[in-house]
Image: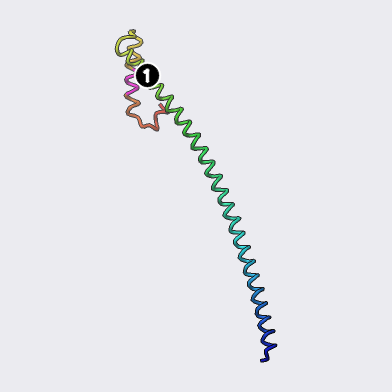
C-alpha cells in the first residue's frame, strides 16, 4: 500500500472516530441533562412534601399545646373546687352530693384508657 492510500485511510478512520466520539458525547450530554431534570423534579417534590409535613407538624404542636393548657386549667379548677368542698369551706347538701359525684367521676376517669376519655 502506498503512503498516500494509507494517509487517506487513516484520515477516513480518524474522521469516522471523531464522528463517533461526537455522537457519543452528544448522547452522554443528553442522558445527563435528562437525569438532572428528573433529579430536580424529584427534589422539588420532596421539598414540597417536607414543607407540607413541617406545616402540619407545627399546626399539631400548637393544637397540642392548646389542649394541654386547657386540660391543665380544667384540672386545676376541679382540684381547687373539690378541695374547697371536701374541706367544708363550701357547705351545703347540694355541694356534698356534687363532691361525692366528682370523686366517683374522678375515680372512673382514672381507670379509663386515654382514648376513651372524650367519649365519656
User: Residue sitting at 32 percent across and 24 percent down?
Assistant: 107
User: Residue sitting at 33 percent across and 27 percent down?
Assistant: 110
In the rendered image of this protein, does residue 93 appear above or below residue 118?
A: above
Residue sitting nearer the eye, 10 or 114: 10
Query: Which picture quadrant has residue 101?
Result: top left
Query: Which picture quadrant has residue 98?
Result: top left
User: Residue sitting at 63 percent across and 66 percent down?
Assistant: 27
Residue tagged by mark 1?
78
Residue 106 point in image, percent of width and height:
34, 23
User: Residue sitting at 58 percent across and 59 percent down?
Assistant: 35
In-image side of 108 versus 41 (left or right): left
Q: Which residues are magenta?
A: 101-106
User: Circle 1 — which element?
Assistant: helix
Helix, strand or loop for the magenta stretch, by majority: helix
Residue at the outermost top position: 92
In-image side of 19 versus 114 (left or right): right
Residue at the outermost front position: 3
The answer to if 51 sits in the magenta stretch is: no
In-image side of 109 versus 22 (left or right): left
Residue sitting nearer the eye, 75 or 105: 75
Residue 39 point in image, percent of width and height:
57, 54
Residue at the outermost bottom position: 1
Query: Which picture quadrant has residue 109?
Result: top left
Residue 41 point in image, percent of width and height:
59, 52
Residue 18 point in image, percent of width and height:
65, 74
Amino acid at each position: 500500500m502506498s503512503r498516500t492510500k494509507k494517509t487517506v485511510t487513516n484520515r477516513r478512520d480518524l474522521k469516522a472516530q471523531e464522528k463517533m466520539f461526537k455522537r457519543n458525547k452528544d448522547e452522554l450530554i443528553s442522558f445527563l441533562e435528562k437525569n438532572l431534570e428528573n433529579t430536580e423534579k424529584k427534589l422539588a417534590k420532596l421539598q414540597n412534601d417536607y414543607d407540607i409535613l413541617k406545616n402540619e407538624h407545627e399546626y399539631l404542636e400548637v393544637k397540642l399545646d392548646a389542649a394541654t393548657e386547657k386540660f391543665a386549667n380544667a384540672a386545676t379548677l376541679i382540684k381547687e373546687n373539690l378541695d374547697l368542698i371536701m374541706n367544708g369551706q363550701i357547705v351545703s347538701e347540694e355541694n356534698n352530693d356534687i363532691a361525692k359525684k366528682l370523686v366517683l367521676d374522678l375515680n372512673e376517669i382514672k381507670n379509663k384508657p386515654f382514648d376513651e376519655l372524650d367519649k365519656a
